[in-house]
Amino acid sequence: MSLSAEDNDPLSIQPPIFETLDERTARLAIEQRQKEVSDRIDAELEKARAAERRGPKPIKILLLGQSESGKSTTLKNFQLMYDPKSFRAERASWRAVIQLNVIQSIRIILDGMERAQRYDHEHSISPQSPKKGLPHLTPELLGIKTRLTDLLEVEKALIRRLTGGSTELMPTQATPQNGISKQGLKEIAINSTIPWKNAFNRLIKSEERSSFDSADGIDWQDPEDPWLLLHERSQDMIQLWNSPNIKQLLVKQNIKAEDLNGYFLDSLDRVAARRYVPTDDDILRARLKTLGVSEHRFKIVTSGYNASMRDWKVYDVGGHRSQVTAWAPFFDDMDAIIFLAPISGFDQVLEEDHRVNRLEDSFKLWTMIVSNPLLKNTNLILFLNKIDILRTKLASGIKLKDYVVSYGDRPNDVDNTTAYLKRKFGGIMSECSLSPRIFYCHFTTVTDTKSTKYILSNLKDMLMRQNLLKTNLMS
């Protein structure tokens, strides 16, 4: 069979069959340069591996806890403290996540309005004589609902860009109440292997990075940026969110504050502004579920007279029930595990299994960790997280004893409930741990940077001291 010039296979390692002498010389020169670059990269990688083998082992921390326990927010705090430059460089990507959070919160409200309309229609309830206890959707609110439906297409576009078209949908909590069936809401979960943070950042030249400002990474000319529509609809969203009828509707349909991102809905004037740049607090409160395991490296300076730089590796493992079995391979060779238990979830069920109470699930996961033989020599640090939400719930009259029978008739205040929960988790460690352990426990609100920074700084010093002692003993 004869070959023509058109038959050249772009994947073939053979040179083109009709190559001239000049073309061959040019091709070989290019291939030589490419080989030199490749060899230099290989040499640098090997040099880095050798240095890592010779130097002290990195300190490894594993973040564990059920879904939405605060693991990702804790990781953001690590990044803000020890790698602020990269944290700042990611603002453009988190800006898109925040826009998505706002739109999805509005969608939950619109879905609630749709269910209320359907319920009214099915029960033949007229606006003139609404059933007692049900909120009335005024023509003005229905007009806002119609105008805001075009945000749903923006939501789809943002999800496509964030996920690169590869995504999984996770059900959010849905509890029927008062005869109104609340359909299972869906939110995206991005695989940790997808480089979603690259989708929205403007390319920055290397010579510009030294003077890089967080706003520089945002592509203000991006035709797909939803800021224009969000800005145009901001007053409608504000009016909807502040409507007493809508607040009543959310209560009647058992849509809780945790289902919505009220922090951003309360800040719509700012978040929907034309040149909005997220603050540190905004990024900490942005929600984006991830699947799989992500590894983050930090170089942290030890304190004291002989200060030195140490490598830290922090692993964030997905907390969805389907991923708990993926935790075990990471148990070996960890210096510490930070386990986050969202104690505000005492009146909630798992999103993935409505038969399981969230607090009870945290007790079971904590039992599994403290009793695991692979972890008998690993530091375990317990974060009883979301104490701010717990305080709000207790103040509103929600009683812990209605969900935790063993709490009995103790006072339903923050001091007594937190003391009880701390004893409960500490008792599990005492009873189930395979070796004597110090019970490290902190009450946290990981969206509060000041208090979390204090806790993480103390944790850093503790692990550094223990690692140094271990190294000296071994040597």
Image (cartoon, rainbow, N blue to C red):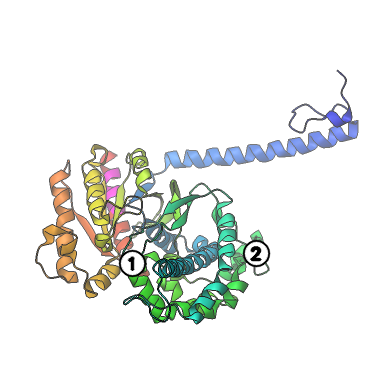
Three-letter code for the amino acid on which mark 1 is drawn: Asn
Query: In the rendered image, is residue 418 in sight?
Result: no
Observer-nearest of 12 and 399 = 399
Vertical order, 435 against 413 (above or below): above
Query: Residue 446: where, in percent of width, then height?
Result: 34, 64
Classify the position of the C terminus by image quarter.
top left
What amino acid is at disc 2?
Glu
Q: Is residue 466 magenta?
A: yes
Going by the image, does 439 lie left or right of 356?
left
Q: Position of residue 166 (x, y in %)?
A: 55, 48
Q: Residue at x 38, y 64 (%)?
A: 259
- Which residue was labeled with disc 2? 224
Residue at x 51% of width, y 63% of height:
97
Residue farthest along the front direction in this orientation: 124
Find the distance from the CA under tag 2 to the CA under tag 1.
35 Å
Identify the mark at residue 370; answer none if there is no mark. Answer: none
Residue density around tag 1, few if under 14, some if 14–19, many if 20 or more, within 10 Å: some
**Residue 220 visible (yes or no):** yes
Q: Within the image, what quadrant is residue 153 found in? A: bottom right
| In this picture, residue 249 sits left or right of residue 22 | left
Q: Taken as a whole, is the magenta stretch helix, strand or loop? A: helix
Q: Nearer the viewer, mark 2 or mark 1?
A: 1
Mark 1 element type:
loop
Residue 150 lies in quadrant: bottom right
Residue interval drawn in magenta: 463-471
Q: Secondary structure at mark 2?
A: loop
**Mark 2 touches mark 1? (CB < 8 Å):** no
Which residue is denoted by mark 1 in the rendering?
A: 254
Percent coordinates x, y for residue 376 in the rendering: 22, 41
Residue at horizontal 51%, vertical 67%? 103
